[in-house]
Image (spheres, coloured by chain):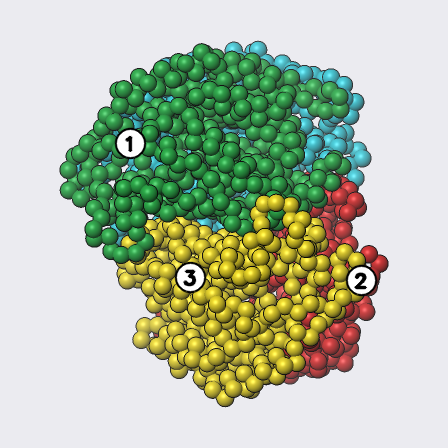
Chain colours: A cyan, B green, C yellow, D red
Amino acid sequence: MIRYLTAGESHGPKITGIVEGVPAGLELSEDDIALHLARRQKGYGRGGRMAFEKDRAEISSGVRFGKTTGAPIAMQMPNRAYEKDDAGWPKVMNKEGDGADVDPITVPRPGHADLIGIQKYRYNDIRPSIERSSARETAIRVACCFPARKLLKHFGIEIGGHVIRIGSSGYEKPWEDVRNLVDPMLKDGAETVFKAADESPVRCLDEELTQKMRDEIIVRRKEGSSLGGHYEVVVTGLPAGLGSFVHWDRKLEGQLAQVIMGTQAMKGVEIGLGFEAGRRHGQEVHDEITYEDGNYRRGSNRLGGLEGGVTTGMPLIIRGVMKPIPTMLTPIKTVDIETKEEKDTRYERSDVCALPRAVVVIENVIAPVLANAFLDKFGGDSIEEIEERYQAR
Amino acid sequence: MIRYLTAGESHGPKITGIVEGVPAGLELSEDDIALHLARRQKGYGRGGRMAFEKDRAEISSGVRFGKTTGAPIAMQMPNRAYEKDDAGWPKVMNKEGDGADVDPITVPRPGHADLIGIQKYRYNDIRPSIERSSARETAIRVACCFPARKLLKHFGIEIGGHVIRIGSSGYEKPWEDVRNLVDPMLKDGAETVFKAADESPVRCLDEELTQKMRDEIIVRRKEGSSLGGHYEVVVTGLPAGLGSFVHWDRKLEGQLAQVIMGTQAMKGVEIGLGFEAGRRHGQEVHDEITYEDGNYRRGSNRLGGLEGGVTTGMPLIIRGVMKPIPTMLTPIKTVDIETKEEKDTRYERSDVCALPRAVVVIENVIAPVLANAFLDKFGGDSIEEIEERYQAR
Amino acid sequence: MIRYLTAGESHGPKITGIVEGVPAGLELSEDDIALHLARRQKGYGRGGRMAFEKDRAEISSGVRFGKTTGAPIAMQMPNRAYEKDDAGWPKVMNKEGDGADVDPITVPRPGHADLIGIQKYRYNDIRPSIERSSARETAIRVACCFPARKLLKHFGIEIGGHVIRIGSSGYEKPWEDVRNLVDPMLKDGAETVFKAADESPVRCLDEELTQKMRDEIIVRRKEGSSLGGHYEVVVTGLPAGLGSFVHWDRKLEGQLAQVIMGTQAMKGVEIGLGFEAGRRHGQEVHDEITYEDGNYRRGSNRLGGLEGGVTTGMPLIIRGVMKPIPTMLTPIKTVDIETKEEKDTRYERSDVCALPRAVVVIENVIAPVLANAFLDKFGGDSIEEIEERYQAR
Amino acid sequence: MIRYLTAGESHGPKITGIVEGVPAGLELSEDDIALHLARRQKGYGRGGRMAFEKDRAEISSGVRFGKTTGAPIAMQMPNRAYEKDDAGWPKVMNKEGDGADVDPITVPRPGHADLIGIQKYRYNDIRPSIERSSARETAIRVACCFPARKLLKHFGIEIGGHVIRIGSSGYEKPWEDVRNLVDPMLKDGAETVFKAADESPVRCLDEELTQKMRDEIIVRRKEGSSLGGHYEVVVTGLPAGLGSFVHWDRKLEGQLAQVIMGTQAMKGVEIGLGFEAGRRHGQEVHDEITYEDGNYRRGSNRLGGLEGGVTTGMPLIIRGVMKPIPTMLTPIKTVDIETKEEKDTRYERSDVCALPRAVVVIENVIAPVLANAFLDKFGGDSIEEIEERYQAR
């Protein structure tokens, strides 16, 4: 079973991750990972803040001569800003000393973990809440999940995501329009989807909609507000029979929902038709079963590739929502935790819309869930061993 | 940590559950549980099929003189139909013998686990898929989760659910309309919500909408189709600071999403505004922080009681979607797994809409997640011990 | 992954277990399990107490037509004494009522969980401690672990245990004497060991030693004392490569040690030479590696079948110690929890030596650990699927 | 719940660990950790090999101004030898390239993970087995477990270990002699034990025995053999009621046994009298219960501080065995994995006896188990919060 832990603060010296349980013999390089880290950094709607960083996860164990060894893989991403910029991070984030010369932050920003961090951990400074709940952590999460994604890819399982709505700009008929656009692309694997989406500054497959989204971001930036939106992630090549219906915690719907909703700023998730399935009646929802060339197929794929928590062999279709970024130029009312006085939120440099980049995070966080279901089915400790079985199916 | 396993088939002799980790000294009776089992059984849209059963979970361990002992609690729900009816279940579900006199089921119903069970477990009869993936299992899940719900109740934390949409019948402005209706009720605790909803045959708080939903069910029943819909579950009384943002798998959003999406027929989940948050800009989403009478509050509660995966002290608001029941009078195309010939699905007696009853299941399955977050915060092995701390906060 | 929960009190209406994660298609019957339950009940050194019970675990789910379905398996063992005997258990163990007519037990027996149960769970009656910590629970544990044992057996992996010491009666040279006796038997699989041991009333393979152990039990019974001892469990047929050295919690030594030390009355565990390895120097401990007929072997097997936490393909050799039964005719000093006065322990009918029966428990509790390591290696959801791979190795 | 992952190879660039679940507000510094890392490095019986390293774990997250923040703590220990020495480790351990210029190791050393690594992971070079199974990993494990140890210390719970046997040199009556020596020291807390033991080059509390052990090491070094031995670890200050008897996997005996047996080279573990309990009869084993000054005590502590898997409030006494180091100057027979020819093991510089240092590792690995049982009992997210409750007991 692949499992991982991440550590690190947004402005600390580095973020770190350890992934355990990756089979031996998987080709893995820092360049591979860097590709997705770069994708995660690109997207319209960013502020200027992190423009100077170019993320790279340094592997310090578990890989030798370009292949995994089966041992835990440690990765680190040094924070270049920590030393270089003039914000004094080594002093602010000092692991030693008493912090007497560092002013505590006492005005919590609504929508962030600022206030609940204080309440839960009894901090007298909001800084540690800000640092650990920051989306910066998703960079190392992308890196930690990548070996699982690579494993899936080795067996022809591809993942690709794209943006379907930003604020008021979205497909008119979100299910039909997107299916018509995306399903033909899936014959060549879901990576065609992310590659096409990457051509759009907002990761939207539709050119006109891309323009609308960009315009909406410009408007909201001027207003000092922010935006979130909806995305879709598709997975192709999954064999039928991964996951299980025999116990609730083995259902893939649930496991996928947890990793997605466990990602910063996500407030909803759906599989296939999702919420739309509640608006329709049964004949408009369930998928006919057919048999072609020795394989069962579904006439449509409105249930999104899962029945009873188990893969059907059809593409997996997941959608989710990211809330607008809470940090905004136009302030919201809040309270100083020391004086209990009403305050306006202080502006910090921030992005206007993080969704185009968040899609890359979601593509990656679902990979360990699927890889673990795959390993449950096929077992094995090395790619070579798994491959023998996979071929012999 | 509260954990549980369930076992049992829809038409087997009984369904069984074991719950481990419940503190000692919690008042618990079969009558308590039976109340929610009865609620789970009631709701417009049912077929005639299970009308004769009146569920009761028999406790056979872990409770003495009306209180939990801290030991695992075993519960069983005998299937009265197993012996009594004339369908021959003891023969069909025989744990012994070779089954030579039982005809296998070979025509999988789309939307159920029928086909994937065959593919995953190599059954040559669809029966075991049908039996274990059945919604019958949710009865014992309600029972297993009830001790956690009772624990929460002891500390003033209440859960209540209601239906907000069935097919095309739903609130016009799902967020505002429901907030206006529900929020005033929450001052008296979320149980007021379920009690009011229980007055409606479709568990809808709005009388006019109840009528519309009922009419829609009648229409779809006549057509031989089925319906699903949307529900909302609200939790009041949660102290701020449960859950954590420091690691993704400790975020309550994710844990809640897993238990909900791990429930039969659920295809989506959202917290607070959910998908609506993707359609709005930031100023319309984030909640002002205020301070009143020694407590932090949020001016609105559009994030639904969680920030950064941690409770804010505001009511928790969860919504989800249940797909329409796959078993329908009007057949769907499918394939015989033996002959590979195209077939129509065979009709089996079934409900038209299970949503009003499913709401009760969701109310219960979230309870262990919240109780575990509560126990993480307050620790302790007995209600007495936990109470001392809770009072001393 | 196979996992299980048990529930039930020694004098409650029944004990219950649920096992989740057993692959489909495994032949399983109540008779199979009853064999090991009967073995667990037989052994010299018993008191008269439970002579009337003949244990049988009733399966109520997860098995159809003699084979597992992949769904959770629930098992129950009704307590015949509960209704029949005159001790009034239904009243004493009543799940309802206030217990006003039941006298609390207030004198804790040293060596049992009596006192710590009071301290941990704030009971005012020792009864619940007695009931749940009782060795009665090991009966359902044997049943719950049996499917894993059967799975292993299907793939030629056999488990057999025997007693090597009771009190002062044991092999003179515990390692050499036992190896000389047991190793030749292992060519026919480890089940030959338990079958031969079952011929001895104390489950000892040596006839003379059997007589000595029996005599020692007689002497200690007369004195009103009790006895424990040492046992050995051997596993044959394990392929090399189960478990892993890459992370501490994946080492089989640790996982095996936990399940054994998690069993009532066990105070120590060792693999291979165990503690003797600390008395020797390196040349007397490590096993030469040889290569014969296409397989690596070890010249000796002093490390007991594991190197670095991973199976070597040699027999697994585990030893453990069970402490003497704490309930003894000759009293020990203790304290009344109400009055805090010094008291003598009250005698309750009890066995003098439980070790011969405990060996059967240990044989079974290790099975899920080994089966899970096996499933990690070979994967798969049905015996048929696993077998294809196992044959193709 | 405190959990951790470690990564890193013996001769790679660094070893890394991440610890998650440590409460906020715990004082923690690199110097604190370095003390135990230095203790782990010191001990008679070492080879010259690692003399130049002085271990220090660099904390890169989760600590600010000398206190934990509740966020995961990442630690790294760079391998100074990696860059400096002339063995060419950067080439041998290269994460990139094809390794064409690095000769594979093909002669497995008995007693190490060398051969099983090949069998499990299908390596064609033994190097990755050597690197990850090396005792070097225990350095980062000591660091990862230290925050738990510090937490315990904050609440007066102290851990101390010492050596009781090396080869043939050990206490004559291992239980009585050691109890007479150690028990009087425990009034001042178990740290007095490790501090006294640290005065001995072999960490033995007895001066004469220290001399004997040292002599035995000298003899075996000359012979080209190696030694292991027995140790004891004692924990004082544990409140009664940690752990539980209600389910087997919650028993502390089992959890402690896993972490200990999950440590390199450990082949046995026992609690209290341990295996000696099997040689005695009941009256010589069980501990009288007494009541003094408002506390229950045991007249003796032969069960070692645990009854039914739960702490009794008496000192916890754990013993274990470490096997002799497998790498020896005098070769053992083995087989070349390429040619399948018989070979002698190649000598590598190595220690003769690692036990004095391993004691420090065991002291640390048990800390998370005890800290988690403590947190289960007392709950809470910050030291301040836990302390309020602990004082209010």
Q: Amino acid at mark 1?
A: Arg
Q: Is residue D58 left or right of residue D200?
A: left
Residue at the (58%, 50%) spot, across then down: C94
Q: Chain of mark 2?
A: C
Residue at the (47%, 32%) spot, across then down: B38
Q: Residues within 10 Å of mark 3 (few under 14, many from 20)?
A: many
Q: Amino acid at mark 2?
A: Glu
Residue topped by disc 2: C341
Q: Residues within 10 Å of mark 2 (few under 14, many from 20)?
A: few
Q: Chain of mark 1?
A: B
- Asked if the residue under mark 3 is in contact with the one under mark 2, i.e. CB atoms within 8 Å, the reply is no
Q: Residue A205's quadrant in the figure? A: top left
Q: Position of residue C114 (x, y in %)?
A: 67, 60
Q: Give the foreground label among 2 and 1.
A: 2
Same chain for marks 2 and 3? yes
B72, above or below B165, in the image: below
Q: Is residue A192 left or right of residue C20?
A: left
Q: Position of residue A134 (x, y in %)?
A: 60, 31
Q: Is residue A149 visible?
A: no
Specify the quadrant that holds the C terminus of chain B. Answer: top right
User: Looking at the rendered structure, which numbered label has been put on residue C56?
Assistant: 3
In the foreground, A283 or A352 = A283
Residue at the (68%, 65%) spot, across then down: C109
Q: Chain of mark 3?
A: C
Specify the quadrant that holds the N terminus of chain B. Answer: top right
Alpha-carbon span between mark 2 and mark 3: 43 Å
Q: Residue B114's quadrant in the figure? A: top left
Q: Residues within 10 Å of mark 1 (few under 14, many from 20)?
A: some
Q: Position of residue B284 (x, y in %)?
A: 56, 14
Q: Earlier in the sequence, mark 2 or mark 3?
A: 3
Q: Position of residue A276 (x, y in %)?
A: 38, 22
